[in-house]
Each structure stands twice: as C-alpha cells, then as structure tokens.
Image (cartoon, grey):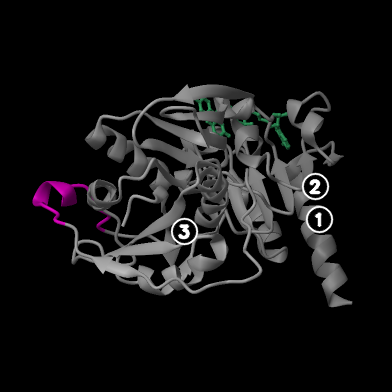
Amino acid sequence: MTAATSVLVLVEHAAGEPDELSLQALALARSYAAAAGGELAAVLIGAPGAAAAAALGAHGVTSAYVAEHDALDDPDGFAPDAWAASVAELIERLAPAAVLAAGSERGNEVLARLGARLEQPMAANCVEAAAANGAGALVTRIRWGGSLLEEATLDGTPVLLTVAPHAVPAQALDAAPQTLPETFTPALDAEDQRVAVVERVAARTGGVSLTDASVVVSGGRGVGSTEGFAAIEELAALLGGAVGCSRAVTMAGWRPHSDQVGQTGTKIAPELYIPCGISGATQHMAGCKGAKRLLAINPDAEAPILASADYAVIGDLHTVVPAINAAIRKARET
Ligand SMILES: Cc1cc2nc3c(=O)[nH]c(=O)nc-3n(C[C@H](O)[C@H](O)[C@H](O)COP(=O)(O)OP(=O)(O)OC[C@H]3O[C@@H](n4cnc5c(N)ncnc54)[C@H](O)[C@@H]3O)c2cc1C
C-alpha cells in the first residue's frame, strides 16, 4: 500500500531477532507515525530478516517488507549502496513521509547514501522528531559529541533521519500482533554492490561486544603501551566485560579502532564503566554518557573525567588495576 504508510523504518537484525537500536528507532517512529495519523512500516534487508520481522507487530509495525537478493542474503555481508537501493525502491512504492533508521554505523551509512540518491538532506543522532506543519520535520538532535542539543527544521520528502542510540527506550505493546512480512526482490546493479564487506575479523572481546557488555574497562594514554593492556584485559575478563579504549590509544596503534569509545568510536551504555588512564575529553565522554556508573582510575585528582565519576581511585593504574584483579581472584577462591 500504501498511501497510509507515513513512516518507514530500516530495521537491522541478527540471528532472527531485530536489533535493539532498531527497536529504539521504532519507538520514536511510532510516535511520529501516530501524530501524523499514518501507519508504521519496516524494511529488513536479506532473507534472514523474515524471522525478525514477525516480532515487529509488538513494536507497532503494521507492514514489514523483506528485501531478498543474492547480494543481500548473507547475514555477515553488508553492501551499503545495495541496502540504500532496496530502501529507495520501497520508498518509491510506499511514498512514506519519513524514513528512519537506528543511529548505528550501518543505519547512519545507509541513510546518508539514501539521502545522496534521493538528493534529500539527512539528520543523524535525533532524540526527538515530529512532522512539521506542511512538509519536513522538527527534530532535536545531539551535536558536538553530545555537548549540545540542536533543534532544527529538517526539509525533505521523505524526511530522512537516524535515532541516537540509547536516547529513546524501545517499547513493546502489551498485545503483540504478528507481522506477516512481504518479500520483494530489489533491482540491484553492479554499482550497488561496489562497496561490500568482504571479510570479518572477530574482535578480541572474549565474546562480549562493547555495545552489549554490562561492564566496560577502558584504557587511555596513561596505559602507556599495548602490553600495558594485559591487566585491563584481565579485569574485563574477571568481570565478564569488554575492553575499550580512548582515541589516543587507537592513534598510537595499541588497540584496534573497534575498541574505541567516543564520538568517533562506539557509544556504550554499560552498568559500570571503568576508564583507566583516560582524561575525559568531551569526545570520549560522548561515547560513555549512557553508562549507569563510572569508576575512574587516574593519578590526577583534577582530571576532567572525575567530574563525571561516581567513584574514583586516585592512583597509578599499573598498581591499582592489578590490585583489584588480585582482590577479585582472592575473593573467588574463598
Ligand atoms: C573530531 C574528534 C573526534 C574525537 N573522537 C574521539 C573518540 O571517539 N574517543 C576518544 O577517546 N577521543 C576522541 N577524540 C580525542 C580526544 O579529544 C582526546 O584527545 C582523547 O580522548 C584523549 O585520550 P586519553 O584520555 O587517553 O589521553 P589524555 O588526554 O592524554 O589523558 C591521559 C590520562 O591518563 C592519566 N594517566 C597518566 N598516567 C597514568 C597512570 N599511570 N595511571 C592512571 N592514569 C594515568 C593522565 O592523568 C590523563 O588524565 C577526538 C578528537 C577529535 C578532535
């Protein structure tokens, strides 16, 4: 259909489940669609998306569309232009007033490419959005690494925006109708498949990803070297968490970029964040604002990170972290 579709959401998925950040995007999209008096539709890329689509009724989705194509069906693959082309094809058919995606790396990239295709502006990192009178939308979005909120009018038909991670909670409805997905095969050409993931290298996180970990232990310039991360890795392992780091560390080549927390790294929201030897630059804090508790380890009592800390150990991480590790090991022996 469908003239009544007012909002279309790109829903990412893995192992037959919709991604949590996409469910958050659906929560914002639901209120946008309700205020506009239209329906909420979802598009999932790749045949495995059909299983994840079934659960979307609980998040207000009335129609789900699964793009199936050889170039899209590998769950480990990602061809951003092919994703954007698939969504563009659906936009032509449904004529939604707005298209939303999670503010994930994929969501931002696909919507930016969609904007280029449609010659429409795209706003990333929105925390609120509502249809404006007439055309476009009024949005509030996070700017400057989280140091300010910008209120803006976003032009364009359709409105294109991504939802900042962890800004809007996902909300399932009590009554959860099943969504029966409709599949379609987008017309993709070689150009659409020019940019694609060709290999995946598993992150060294012992199985817990930075975004999912309930505890993240990060190291900064104060760690001093690649080898200096051994005690931080041990602490993360003891707490069942993941290792993160600051940009000073990735710039020095001590850790891969996939470990970086911050504005240009991963945004995390663990129960406990333990930055060791990190000063607390705005760009770093932009990535860990969602942490429920923060324990800073730093010898400088004036370090900016202490302003955001719930707990602090003023000391040398090379002494403090091994001491914490030893205490945890000892407590577990008894
Ligand atoms: C556009 C842009 C984007 C950026 N994006 C990011 C980003 O995504 N993530 C990010 O992290 N940064 C980012 N940055 C860089 C950011 O501005 C800071 O330069 C960086 O976060 C600093 O890293 P740091 O805290 O590890 O190092 P520093 O600022 O040098 O701080 C080192 C800290 O270690 C402490 N220390 C020293 N020795 C010890 C010890 N033995 N034990 C314990 N503590 C010790 C010091 O007291 C100090 O507080 C970005 C910058 C720009 C311009």
Residue 277 in the figure: left or right of residue 41: right
Q: Name the residue under label 2.
A: 320
The amino acid pointed to by label 2 is Val
The amino acid pointed to by label 1 is Ile
Determine if the magenta segment contains residue 189: yes
The x, y position of residue 54, in whole percent, is 45, 73
The x, y position of residue 161, in whole percent, is 44, 37
Residue 134 in the figure: left or right of residue 171: left
Residue 4 vs 254, above or below: the answer is below
Q: Within 8 Å: ligand 1 and the Cβ of disc 2? A: yes
The C terminus, quarter of image: bottom right
Look at the image and give the residue range highlighted in magenta: 187-198
Residue 88 vs 328, above or below: the answer is above
Residue 234: quarter of image: bottom right
Where disc 2 sits, the SS reads helix
Mark 3–mark 1 Cα distance, whole angstroms, equals 25 Å
Q: Name the residue under label 3.
A: 203
Report if the CB atoms under discs 1 and 2 are less than 8 Å apart. yes
The x, y position of residue 120, in whole percent, is 31, 30
- Circle 3: is it few (<14), some (14-19), or many (20+) Cα within 10 Å? few
Residue 41 vs 98, above or below: the answer is below
The amino acid pointed to by label 3 is Ala
The prevailing secondary structure element of the residues shown in magenta is loop
Quadrant hosting ligand 1: top right
Give me the residue at 35% from left, 41% from top: 111
**Disc number at residue 324?**
1
Answer yes or no: is residue 123 visible: yes
Give me the residue at 81% from left, 55% from top: 324
Where disc 1 sits, the SS reads helix
Mark 1–mark 2 Cα distance, whole angstroms, equals 6 Å
Residue 197: quarter of image: bottom left
